[in-house]
Image (cartoon, rainbow, N blue to C red):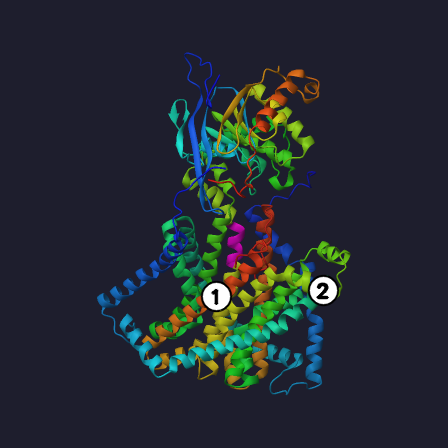
Amino acid sequence: MRAVKSGSYPGHKLIDQTAQTLWFLAPFGILLLVWAAAVAISGVPERIFPSIGGVLQAAATMIADGSLVEHTWASIQRVVIGSLIAMALGVPFGIAMGINRYVAGFFTPILRFSVSLAGIAWIPLATLWFGYGSATVIFIIFNAVFFSLVYSTVLGVSSIPREFYRAAGSLGARRLQTILEVVIPGAMPQIVTGLRVGLGYAWRGLFAAEMIATNLGLGYLLFLSREFYETNKIILSMIIIGILWLLMDRLLLAPLEARTIQRWGMIREVK
Amino acid sequence: MAVREAHIRRPIWALPLLLGRAVSKYSLVRNLGPFLPILFLWWLAVRLEVFPTAFFSGPAEVIASFGNLIYKGILPGYLEDSLYRLISGVFYSLVVGIPLGFLIGLNRTARRLAWPLLLFFQAIGDIAWLPILIIWFGFSLTTVTLVIVYTVIFPLMVNIVAGIDGVPEDLIRAARSLGASRWQVIWEVIVPGALPVIVTGIRTGLGYGWRALIAAEIIVGTSGVGFMMFDARRSAQVTEVFVGMIVLGVLWYATDALILAPLERSTIERWGMVHRPQEAV
Amino acid sequence: MNVGGWYTAPRKRYNMALLEIEHLSKSYFDVYTGEQVLAIRDVSFEIESGEFVAILGPSGCGKTTILNIIAGFVKPSSGKVLLHGRAIQGPGPDRGVVFQNFALFPWKTVMGNVTFGPKMRGIPREERERIAREYIHLVGLEGFEERYPHELSGGMQQRVGVARVLANHPEVMLMDEPFASIDAQTRMKLQEDLTRIWEERKPTIFFVTHDVEEAIFLSDRVIVLSSRPSVVTEVVDVQISRPRKWKDLVGNESFHKLRRHILSLLGGVQIDEQPEVIGEPGA
């Protein structure tokens, strides 16, 4: 078959990717320009609306005295711990519930109820049970991820077509093997989606909980800065929060979805 | 494939009929049944004093407290406040989010510019905006409304864009080769085609908005159910905290399962599209 | 007469051909191999008003792409499409399309779908419903006006697709393998119905297919394409009398001769070895 080559010069893939990244960043560049212009033109006081310089300065100070890293790390730690526990407990639990269709159907309304309560609504109760500190925050995160994960896992497992079980059985698989080889991969799209949704709720719950219940972490930093009208620190924290989530999404969730859902050709649900 | 039974046509004004059907006995039973054993376990746990009573209230106390709060008019008052904020927040979200979502979905330049920004600001999350909003607008309804709008429009817009993208190209081509102009294609094909996904987006957005409202009330509030829970917690009134949580849970759940979900399903079914999104929670 | 891929029809002296396709070529960028692929090398042909022309060729030869170019969905890399001597400008109601997967609007009833075209052109309701009913009756779906597409079988949906296009009175009806996703028996019925409709109304039809027998059964002329990068191998005249019924053709010698001839044209050409790229290129 004859092909006409054009546009395929060496390194064009790298150039393409760089171009794409630049295109992605361009709107932020515009935003920064608008920000700088708005501050300069309107003459709004630093305390109400910080300038880019003010934010950068706050960043420099806080990195220097280590507090920025301290707070950021505390938040990250809590997310990681809470999520890991939630995954370790939630997925097996969800599978156990989901395998039997009737059990799954029975518990679904309760699960949906729990998910609708997940995270933030538990904060008052959590502070009562766990007091002030990391435990409360971790619990909130665990709560948010756990229920979402269980719910999605049950949904995923119970929607595996019966033929798959029959196929596995007639190929000689036993119970445990079926679970590992059929159930888990089959429910993967839902599980991953559940993880994404759960982390979304957890992310919000995290900062709300940190604002209320701790004296360490990005949420707390937000709260504290507000008390002292240090708007530059507020904006700084917000930016870091945004970047953290984007990193988590790009480096964790997206690859996970790519390797499971997309690679296996399953449809990815829109959230 | 044989022709099935003729569908009962469901024009928009039959919506009340639809709602009636949804709230029918059968649906309620199916949705509430599973809670009975949980209720029993709960009662048992309290009876056996599995948890210290200071931290854990039983169904009896909760119901009593619930009755008390209603009687004193506190609960209905707070509920009204919360709902009012939510509804006004959602209203503004729709007013801003729907046109914006369509603009981004349909216009290439707008999408290029807005999409990265959208992802980033969505990542920041609504709660993180509270401090700065409090500085700008104080502890007011404006702040709470802004938080709700912020929370709701992102899933809404993301879904609008996804819905627009999801309209099969053939349908658009068919319309154009039948003489539809650009605007006609948008109005006659893209909007109806994207509608199921958009309804899912509204549902998801409402879920987020509800949570954002509670968080805002806890942190900012002077009234409302979220505030009530936090206030009760401060005076160690565990029972009231429980009441608050249950009221929240029930309210949202009822709204979602009995109104929003059937609405979403019927939008999809009415148009017979084979598209089952994961149940938005 | 064939001159290196350009078929020269005995031109009617005072009438311009309705549709002239001149030296079309199309290349596209294949994402899987990262190369430019030439799908269509040089294709030219003409269609007269009232003709039923089929186009046929091996997989990947670009026949659907040609249809998409004529429909205005896709721009050719070079070449022209002239309708009544004027170049086309994108999609339009003068070239109606019947799609392989029907593309009916799921939220509209049969009536809603068929009245769509007239509605777009601003024809008042009573008038367009009258037109619609006429064509719904023509395709044999009387009584199903208020059904939704998902309540209909595949064959019925495609009838709606045809009615929808015809109700718009296009200059040409472009049909993109319209019966490919329909079971064999329904397909034969639909093919017979299509010829019946054509004989009644004589629309100009451009029909893309991969099925040799279908092409012969339906058309006046069959354009045979080579494999990619494609050119017109030959244009075969179908001189079988009308009306045509499947049961009659079984014993018809001309039919079988034509069939063998066309198959040899297809088989004799080198089969494209590349696996078919999923998704329509250039679409």
Q: Is residue B12 visible?
A: yes
Q: Given the image, on which type of amino acid does mark 2 rest?
A: Gln
Q: Which residue is mark 2?
A: A177
Q: Which mark is residue A251?
A: 1
When the figure is inspected, residue C254 is found, relative to residue A157, above or below; the finding is above
Question: Does B219 lie within the magenta span?
Answer: no
- Tell me if I can see residue C123 in this picture: no
> CA–CA distance between discs 1 and 2?
31 Å
Q: Earlier in the sequence, mark 1 or mark 2?
A: 2
Q: Position of residue B25 (x, y in %)?
A: 69, 60
Is residue B130 left or right of C189 when viewed as pictured? left
Q: Is residue C218 above or below residue B226?
A: above
The magenta segment is B195-202
Query: Residue C246 vs residue B156: left or right?
Result: right
Residue type at mark 1? Leu
For the point 68% across and 19% down, the residue is C249
Residue at screen point 39% across, 69% down? B142
- Measuring from the top left, give residue B216's x and y in whole percent: 45, 73
The image shows residue A266, relative to residue B183, as above or below, that is below
